[in-house]
Amino acid sequence: MQELARLSSMAAALLDTAAAIAHFACIFWGARGLRLLGAGERIAGLAEAGHWYPPLISTAIGTLLSLLAVYALSGAGLLGPLPGQRPVLAVAGAVFLFRAVATPWLKPLFQGNNARFWVVSSAICLTLGLLHLAAALRS
């Protein structure tokens, strides 16, 4: 059981890192990258106009995901323990799970996001939520 929790922590770190890289890449890809990831025309249009909001949001999300990857690596025992490790991983898991199941309520608020975005991001959030909760149990 401990090995499964350790593998879950490592998988969470890997997925957090991949998601962080995708968000950071959108800073450089601009509107094209945002469209590719399904973020919607409103945010892509802002990026095309050179608005500060898309790169700021991409940076903030990428930074948060990078921090979660470090916590997940710590949860896997690959780094030393971090302050608040268990609660951070548990809260991250709960937030990801909430995001995964809240799609019907969030979708009307972000009408520009395409169907692929909702399906893919919800599946990723569900997976990340379960993996982070498993990491929290191991910590």
Image: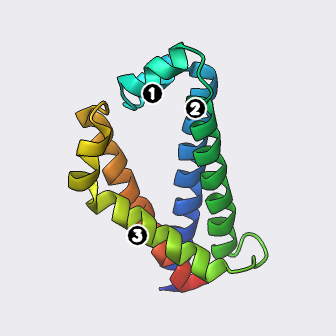
The C terminus, quarter of image: bottom right
Displayed quadrant of residue 127: bottom left
Q: Position of residue 36 (x, y in %)?
A: 41, 24
Q: Earlier in the sequence, mark 3 or mark 1?
A: 1
Q: Nearer the viewer, residue 128 or 117?
A: 117
Labels 3 and 2 touching (C-beta < 8 A): no
Q: Earlier in the sequence, mark 2 or mark 1?
A: 1
Displayed quadrant of residue 22: top right
Disc 2 element: helix
Q: Which residue is mark 1?
A: 43
- Tell me the residue at 56%/44% (across/down): 18
Q: Which residue is mark 2?
A: 53
Describe the colour scheme in one phrase: rainbow
- Mark 1 is surrounded, within 10 Å at the Cα level, by few (under 14), some (14 to 19) or many (20 or more) other residues, namely many
63, above or below 132, in the image: above
Asked whether residue 138 appears in the rendered view, the answer is yes
48, above or below 93, in the image: above
Labels 2 and 1 touching (C-beta < 8 A): yes
- Mark 2 is surrounded, within 10 Å at the Cα level, by few (under 14), some (14 to 19) or many (20 or more) other residues, namely few
Asked whether residue 119 appears in the rendered view, the answer is no
Q: Nearer the viewer, residue 32 or 127?
A: 32
Which amino acid type is marked by label 1? Ile
Q: Which mark is residue 115?
A: none
Q: Earlier in the sequence, mark 3 or mark 2?
A: 2
Q: Position of residue 115 (x, y in %)?
A: 23, 35
What is the tally of numbered marks visible in this picture?
3
Which amino acid type is marked by label 2? Tyr
Separation of residues labelled 3 and 1 (CA atoms): 29 Å
From the viewer's perspective, is 25 left or right of 84?
left
81, above or below 130, in the image: below
Return the residue found at the far left. 104
Q: Which mark is residue 130?
A: 3
